[in-house]
Amino acid sequence: MLKLFPILFLFLTPLFGKNPADQIIANARYASSLNNIEFKGKFKKGFKSTPILLKMLGNDIQLYYQKDGQDKGIQLKLDQNNCTLYNISSGQRSKFPTSQFGASIEGTDFTYEDLSLRFLYWNGGNLLMEEKIKTRECYKVRVNNPGNAGNYKYADLWIDKKSFALMKMQGYDAQARHIKTLEPTDLMNVDDKIMMKKMKVRTMENGRTKSESSLILENPEGILKNTNRPRKMR
């Protein structure tokens, strides 16, 4: 399948420009953005769940939860080619230390770089192939971490060809070991965009699932369009 890449590249270059992978990822960034919408939800691992509030304000995304009885939060400030993480505590904002990008959130398999989808801002990607995820036709793109922050040296992304929604991510460490899989399992239509309702993250070890967690969002009241119920990934 990889041998088809040169032909695929030539076909997509007129459509997306000199680097089709970068344009596909840019479209995926846009597809994941929403304006002035709040979601209630929870992180879940085993029998433990942590309530959250997610605010999507265009280029400003904020997540709040409680830790040790105190309100905690993180903020993502986005621009065209970059995302910056901040801590929010007691109403004060401070820049998030890059050394903590790969740290677990409340003991779950989610890390801060998973939650921020930071890999969608890594430029210079390579378009590997077109491949199906269940019944969805996807572009498979490989992106390389431009620095040393976080747990991933590179990541493979499956981007839906029609909606440009992220369908799957596999993260690899510096030894090219597959260490994480991130995959939406339920989708919903929000403000005419396809968005995940439930995201499953699996920590991998020697090709097997070591542990897994989920991020589950509730439907935002008064916002959903053209949908009756969440759609299962097929």
Image: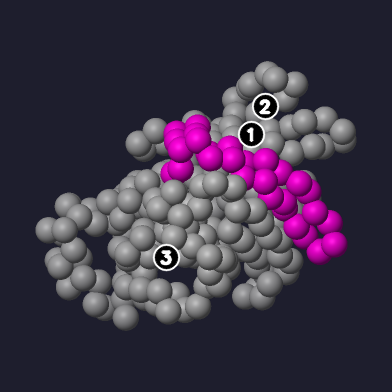
Q: Position of residue 108 (x, y in %)?
A: 74, 54
Which numbered circle lies on residue 74? Answer: 1
In which quadrant will I find the N terminus?
bottom left
Dot 2 or dot 1, earlier in sequence? 1
Q: Residues within 10 Å of mark 1 (few under 14, many from 20)?
A: many
Residue displayed at 54% across by 53% down: 152
Q: Position of residue 24 (x, y in %)?
A: 31, 55
Residue displayed at 68% across by 60% down: 214
Tell which of 32 and 148 is nearer to you.
Answer: 32
Are the residues at dot 2 and dot 1 in contact (C-beta closer than 8 Å)? Answer: yes
Q: Position of residue 182 (x, y in %)?
A: 57, 62
* Amino acid at the residue labelled 3: Trp
Secondary structure at numbered mark 3 = strand
The image quadrant of residue 9 is: bottom left
Instruction: State the residue lying farthest toward the left.
Output: 14
Magenta range is: 33-60
Residue displayed at 72% across by 51% down: 42
Q: CA distance from mark 2 to mark 1?
A: 5 Å
Secondary structure at numbered mark 2 = strand
